[in-house]
Image: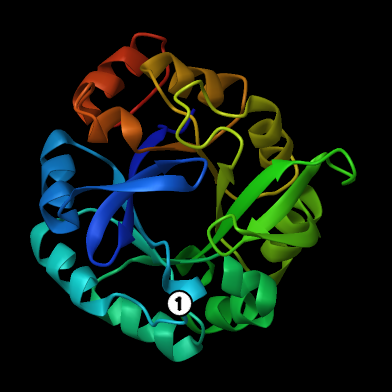
Amino acid sequence: MLKKRIIVCLDVKNGRTTKGVKFQNNRDIGDPVEMAEEYYRQGVDELVFYDIMASADGRRPILDLIARVADRIFIPFCVGGGITTLEDIKSTILAGAEKISLNSQAVKNPELIKEGARVFGNQCIVLGMDAARDKSMPSGYRIFINGGRVKTDLDAREWAQKAVSLGAGEIVLNSIDADGTKNGYEIALTKMIAESVGVPVVASGGAGKPEHLADVFTRGSADAALIATMVHSGEYTVSSIKRAIAAHNIPVRF
């Protein structure tokens, strides 16, 4: 079995790390560069930075922040928010990111996935998906964009499969219903998407204790798990989470 990855997510707003619950009531929790460096020291496998207001505000990628992070950490990191063109992808990668995440913009312009994968390779293109339960959709889940504020007509499973066919090399799957609740990942959603596509799926939204990660790795078939509140709160460190997961006989990187 491939080793499972632990990824810390840093939501960035106005140059600061922020955290909310179900995409609402966000509060400032620190400097993203300092936090990235701390999680790197703790042994995190990867980092993800989302400029959560970039799409809504029509802003470009946070290149200065990306460059400062790249100077401090030496693990893969992914950047999302404000990436609307091939030039944006290029400038983000040149600033130091290994991957870029397309979420709202992928929905608005699916060809950007295809062109990005053609020029930079599938491994650089990550599809970010924000999904919420909706019984009227074929899979039972609907896609939302612009930080979970705008409903689309896209079914979660159908959109995941289309994005992969266009060239997305990985999916970060966030459950809006579970986001920030600390009650566990949405196992049914994660398993459904993981079994519907042939690329790695990263579970996101809801982690509150190490057992939640163990659960989504086993029952949810996730290849990696995104965490935020667990470590931002100081309740856990990345290394303590890895030790707890390893105790479940799940392979992780130390």
Q: Residue at x 14, y 57 (%)?
A: 33
Q: Report whether residue 100 is seen.
A: yes
Tally of numbered tags: 1
Q: How is the image coloured?
A: rainbow
> Is residue 36 rendered to the left or right of residue 26?
left
Asked if residue 94 is positioned above or below residue 192 in the image, the reply reads below
The percent position of residue 243, horizontal first and vertical second, equals 26, 16
Q: Amino acid at mark 1?
A: Asp
Which percent across, then down, holds residue 228? Answer: 34, 38
Question: Residue at (25%, 31%) from the top-left corner?
Answer: 231
**83 and 93: which is toward the camera:** 83
Q: Quadrant of residue 232?
A: top left
Q: Label 1 belongs to which residue?
A: 57
Which of 35 and 24 lies nearest the eye of the viewer? 24
Q: Callout 1: 10 Å neighbours few (<14), some, many (20+)?
A: few
Answer above or below: position of 222 versus 77.
above
Q: Nearer the viewer, residue 121 or 191?
A: 191
Residue 254 can be seen in this image: no
- Say left or right for 12 vs 83: left
Which part of the image, by quadrant, shows the C terminus? top left
Relative vertical location of residue 57 with respect to residue 43 in this rendering, above or below: below
Occupied quadrant, residue 52: bottom left
Report x, y in % for residue 118: 57, 81
Residue in the image at 41% along x and 12% along y: 249
